[in-house]
Amino acid sequence: MRHAAKLISTGPIRRATDTMGHPGHMLAVQGAVVVSYGIRRRPYGNGVRISPDGGESWSRPLILNDDSPVADLGYPSTAPIGPGRFLTIWYEGRGAGSVLRQARWRIAE
């Protein structure tokens, strides 16, 4: 069975962030763009950056965790769980096994 997908563009990306991680997930919420990404350099972890203006400017990194023992991590996904509140879940390799970790966080007012 073949599937076809249509790419829909809503406009150009204004400015790239200066994060060293590969953005795993972008989310548009409450007029802002939320980018969650893995940090694969020491200290290993995951972070979030927020653009209130469609990508023209970006917040400083919000570090969700920086205690991962290995660089085999990331692929975060973020979902809103309430007004200004979010849940981010990511993968983390741990030798013979892997785990899913999470962080609940909020946008400061």
Image: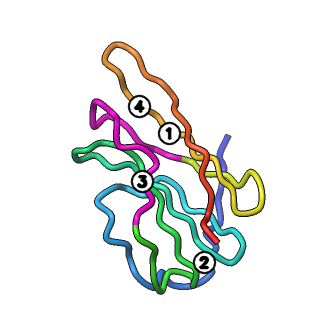
Q: Which residue is mark 4?
A: 92
| Earlier-in-chain disc, 3 versus 1 | 3
Q: Residues within 10 Å of mark 1 (few under 14, many from 20)?
A: many
User: Mark 3 is on which residue type?
Assistant: Ile
Q: Residues within 10 Å of mark 4 (few under 14, many from 20)?
A: many
Distance between the Cα atoms at labels 4 and 2?
Answer: 32 Å
* Label 4: which secondary element: strand
Picture disc at residue 90: 1
Residue shown at 41% from the left, 31% from the top: 92
Q: Which residue is mark 2?
A: 9
* Label 2: which secondary element: loop
The magenta stretch is 61-76
- Residue 22 coordinates in the image, percent (x, y): 37, 55
Q: In the image, 6: left or right of 66?
A: right
Whether 74 is among the magenta residues is yes
Picture disc at residue 63: 3
